[in-house]
Image (cartoon, helix red, strand yellow):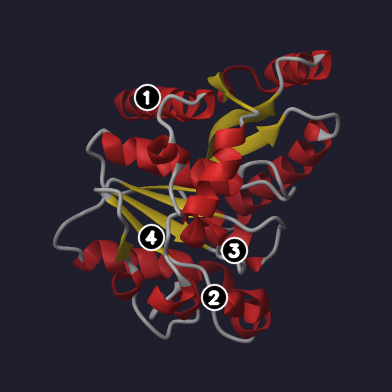
Amino acid sequence: MRTLAIANQKGGVGKTTTAINLGTALAATGKKVIIFDTDPQGNASTGIDIQPSDRDVTAYEVLVGARPLGAAIIPTKVPNLHIVPGHANLSGVETELMAGLRPQHRLRDALAAFNAEAAEPFDYMLIDCPPSLNILTVNALTAADGVLVPLQCEFFALEGLAQLLNTIEAVKANLNPKLEIQGVVLTMHDKRTILSDQVAEEVRAHMGAKVYETVIPRNVRLSEAPSHGLPAIVYDQTAPGSKAYIALAKEMIEREQGLMAA
């Protein structure tokens, strides 16, 4: 199972939207996908209609070692798409983890145990990280094979990216030597503004081939869909945002195939 952390310490850049819709698009191709929701707000869970009453075992129990990963995986209404739901208890989990052994490795250890025992393997786990570089994000980076970075087309995009890249390098040096940037996806692009194009050009100049060709537009359907408990791809497959995530999934699979062939 390939594990990708969807990370950016800035809030509102499209991490959860990317986790939900990229996961759905991958599932539509026949890939078996798990979304691991590490956000205490649990927006990825709510966005695919997993209500709090349905969350008997959550990411919190997995990270503190109370329950195995397999016990927390819930099927969603989307075929092939599963989720480990978030929980409000994750907001205070840092203190609990830091008081125990191997606090940065909790998710990695849970994944290793799951992969060793899983009768029916999954293809991808997408970890929806919280909007901060805390112990939850470090756990995600320590467990991941790669990092997918949603980057909003706004003025301060590169400033936040530099901080995230430093964190990724620190995790790679000290905790997870295999960690790589899987790709950078430009989100919330507004074709009506010159600024969006300027930011996109600057990011491509700085990050080169790491930046996906697919750009996610600013699109009202992407914002509406979670209120209906649906991925945008299911809510309105014809919307520009939905089409963009379908294209992103195709591009990501091609990139993954290239990595495996290298």
At 60% across and 42% down in the image, what residue appears? 223
- Residue 194 placement (x, y as % from top left): 82, 13
Q: Distance between the residues labelled 3 and 1?
A: 26 Å
Q: Is mark 1 on a helix, strand or loop?
A: helix
* Depth order, front residue of 105/57: 57
Is disc 1 surrounded by few (<14), some (14 to 19) or many (20+) residues within 10 Å? some
Quarter where residue 82 is shown: bottom left
- In space, the residues marked 2 and 1 are separated at their CA atoms by 36 Å
Q: Distance between the residues labelled 4 and 1?
A: 21 Å
Mark 2, residues whose alpha carbon is within 10 Å: few (<14), some, or many (≥20)?
Answer: few
Estimate how packed mark 4 is, as few (under 14), some (14 to 19) or many (20 or more) residues with alpha carbons within 10 Å: many
User: In the rendered structure, are the residues bearing label 3 and label 4 in contact, judged by CB atoms less than 8 Å apart?
Assistant: no
Q: Where is residue 220 in the image (x, y as percent from the top left)?
A: 61, 34
Residue located 67% across and 46% down the image: 8
Q: What element carries label 3?
A: loop
Q: Are marks 2 and 1 in contact (CB under 8 Å)?
A: no
Q: Which of marks 3 and 1 is nearer the N terminus?
A: 3
Question: Whole-percent x and y of residue 126?
Answer: 44, 49
Say which residue label 3 marks.
Answer: 39
Query: In which quarter of the view is residue 110 placed?
Result: bottom left
Q: Which of marks 4 and 2 is nearer the N terminus?
A: 4
Could you tell me the amino acid type at mark 2? Arg
Tell me: residue 96, above or below residue 59. Answer: below
Badge number at residue 250: 1
Looking at the figure, which quarter contains the C terminus? top left
Residue 255 left/right relative to 97:
left
The mark that comes first in sequence, 2 or 1, is 2
Q: In the rendered image, which residue does mark 2 sit on?
A: 102
Q: What residue type is labelled 4?
A: Ile
Q: Nearer the viewer, residue 179 or 33?
A: 33
Amino acid identity at mark 1? Lys
